[in-house]
Amino acid sequence: MSKAKLLIFFLSIFLLGDLTYSFLQYYYTPLDGDISAGVVPSAHVQQVLDDPFGFHLLSTGEKHVNPNRFFAHFLFMEYMQKVPLWLQNLTDPITSVYLSCAFMKILIHFLLLFLLSALISGTRNILDKKFLICAALIIPFIQANGYWGHMGINDRSTTYTFFYALPVILLMVFLMPFYSMVFLKEIQMPNVIRTVFLFALAIILPLSGPLIPGLVLIVAGLIGIHYLRYFSWADHSISTDGLLSGFRKIPAPIYIFLIPICLVSLYSLFLGRFDLNYTSETIPLADRYMRLPLGIYYQISQSLGVPLLLIIIGLNVFLIKKRFYTPEGKKIIGALKWIGIFSAVYIFLLPLGGYRPYRPNILRYDTFMPVTIALLYFYGLSTNFLIGSLKFRAKKVYMVGLLAFFAIYMNADRLETDKYYCERNALVYLANSTDKITLLPTNCNVMSWDHFDNPKWSEKNAIMLKYWRITKDVKLYYHPGDQK
């Protein structure tokens, strides 16, 4: 076997092993407290499902929760209603629910890995050596546990994975053609199937996750600035004719696809003004901006995840500027400048998105996710460039240091099973109970954010468990107070 094939073999084994381990981490994650509200569904979710595009809301002026997130609610409900029941052809009802959550998360995990590796390597062939090297560089940094609290992609809550990680990954899919046009200068009109797909995403994405409308408008604005700067300001002057000339030279596909998604994003932001979510707990905009610096500080100071990634990026920038400031090296450093502008604008605009008491300092792993992905992209791009550019001795030292960083991230990302087994055992106990109202034998959360002291609080969960065939009847349950 040649060295190239041997490398491909070992990289493939490493990636499959890591993905399998990540799947187990997702499987052993407890169920969150919002599943039943989104799947039964609750009254406020039903309002969204009954008014997908908010037309009724606009005609009446009524307000309700999440009026601009129909597609996230719909996809989550359909998935969690149907997939667990389908999996019960293969396994027991309790296992089917945990498997359903794990399958969605590992799919998002894989899609992120695939997209970043394809962008960095320039190929979508998962068996290509270049692709596998890029994937191996990226995968230790996609944390399921470990440093997840500051650089996580998949939420531990399956519910919020549908509202944050999934829409952001699908937005990356949508933006792939524009990356080719802007960064690679490959301008071509997508075929009919991809065109229909992109138009569908242009409608679906802004009416899904809370981050999407803002991200779309920021990226579209930066693309516009890129072209106007490149075509109109090359002579260091600004004129009406120059601006018009710049607009005319922007590739047609960018207009065709970005304008619709921008318009739907603006509409989504307008619908967001009718959102009742946490309106009684909001704080003034000035106070949100006052809290933002603390959020940034916590993001980079409470664990090693983000600081270590920034250290690697800083080292890569230093090496490229000092030793490899070639046209390709300059292009990579230029990409970092755009990432910096994107990150600064995005973080600065975050307080405009409202306030959540569970996210008191505005910035958290979920709202930081787009920046995390951008940093992972640049880390992979610059590291892959240096591996291909450094000479043997320098490369050997660099690789040893890189492996040390890998070891830190992989050691942190450990399997956690205690909460899973506690919750699962409680579900088994509930399934076997003959009581209509059951006192659980354990104090751990069961499809809840907190303990149920009152059995009535478990009603939606009880309906959900019967639907999933975990229980034969609607069985209310409650926790044993302060018992440990």
Image: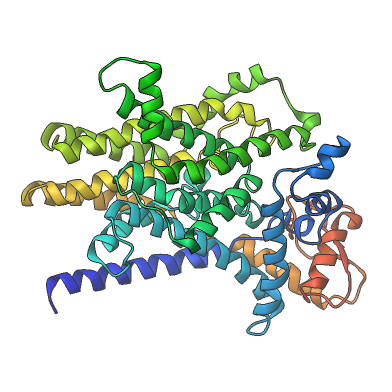
Quadrant assignment, res 226? top left
For the C terminus, the quadrant is: bottom right
Q: Is residue 316 above or below residue 38?
A: above
Q: Is residue 69 left or right of residue 48?
A: left
Residue 444: x %, y % from top left: 72, 58
Q: Is residue 152 left or right of residue 276?
A: left
Q: Is residue 417 left or right of residue 61?
A: left
Q: Is residue 321 above or below residue 38?
A: above
**Which residue is at 90% across, 58% downward?**
455
Residue 312: x %, y % from top left: 29, 40
Q: Can residue 159 be seen?
A: yes
**Which residue is at 64% across, 51% downward?**
160
Residue 381: x %, y % from top left: 28, 46
For the N terminus, the quadrant is: bottom left
Residue 8: x %, y % from top left: 23, 70
Quadrant assignment, res 305? top left
**Which residue is at 62% across, 51% downward?**
204
Q: Can residue 415 be seen?
A: no
Q: Residue furthest bottom?
A: 89
Between residue 418 and residue 197, name the one nearer to us: 197
Q: Is residue 43 above or below residue 345?
A: below
Quadrant assignment, res 340? top left
Q: Is residue 101 above or below residue 177?
A: below
In this figure, which colouring scheme has been used for the structure?
Answer: rainbow
Between residue 350 and residue 445, name the one nearer to us: 350
